[in-house]
Amino acid sequence: MSVKTSSFDKLNPEQLLKVRQIIKKHQGEDGALIPILRDIQEELGYLPRDAQVEVAQKLNIPLSEVYSVITFYALFSLKPKGKYHINVCKGTACYVRGAEGILEKLKDVLGIGPGDTTDDGLFSIDVIRCLGACGLGPVITINDETYARLKPDNIPGIIARYTDVGTKDYEERPVQEKVNV
Ligand code: FES
């Protein structure tokens, strides 16, 4: 069986050196796997396949064990965040005002779910608990911009604003409210 890899999976020599230093720092500790993965995630922003292979080899454990730990814990990511990182608030206030519908529409438009990044590296999605703008829900942020009082129909126009096409479509939609919080 061949495993599909992408540019996300590769480490450059400098990154490989960092990964090896991190492994060396924790090697021999009880339960070294999670601290190693945490430190690599902190260093690189995610856990590329080359790093997983390195960890498995140095700790002498199956790659499948490394992978299952990464996919079990939400704090670990298999891909770098997108150029445009979307946080969807699913705190109580946003939830009761329809945050789930906003998330579903984002998944539909971008073809990815929470914790994932589009293959072109442009967009990533995370779900968070509160953005501190509860009266304006449902709320999302895209990098430094906040979009409030959203309806699912607003999503395609907002996303189009960050791609080459559809900017005009977004500008013509007064429905969603951009705020600074
Ligand atoms: S619950 Fe969404 S901003 Fe607070």
Image (spheres, rainbow, N blue to C red):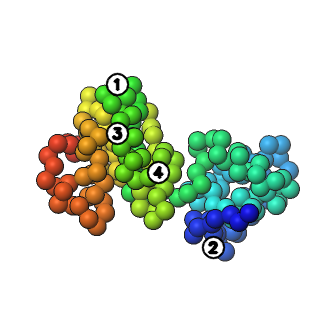
Q: Kindly check if marks 1 and 2 are in contact, taking CB atoms under 8 A apart as contact.
A: no
Give residue 165's quadrant in the image: bottom left
The reply to whether residue 41 is visible in this rendering is: yes
Q: Residue at x 26, y 28 (%)?
A: 135
Mark 2 packing: few (<14 Cα in 10 Å), some, or many (20+)? few
**Above/below status of 142 relative to 140:** below
Using the image, tell me which numbered label, if any, was put on residue 102: 3
Q: Earlier in the sequence, mark 3 or mark 4?
A: 3
Mark 1 or 2: in front is 1
The reply to whether residue 132 is visible in this rendering is: no
Front residue (pair 80, 110): 110
Left or right: residue 66 versus residue 172 is right
Q: Earlier in the sequence, mark 4 or mark 1?
A: 1
Residue under label 1: 96
Q: CA distance from mark 1 to mark 3?
A: 12 Å
Amino acid marked by disc 1: Val
Amino acid marked by disc 4: Ile
Q: Position of residue 9 (x, y in %)?
A: 62, 65
What kind of element bears circle 4?
loop
Q: Kindly check if marks 1 and 3 are in contact, taking CB atoms under 8 A apart as contact.
A: no
Q: CA distance from mark 4 to mark 1?
A: 23 Å
Using the image, tell me which numbered label, if any, was put on residue 112: 4
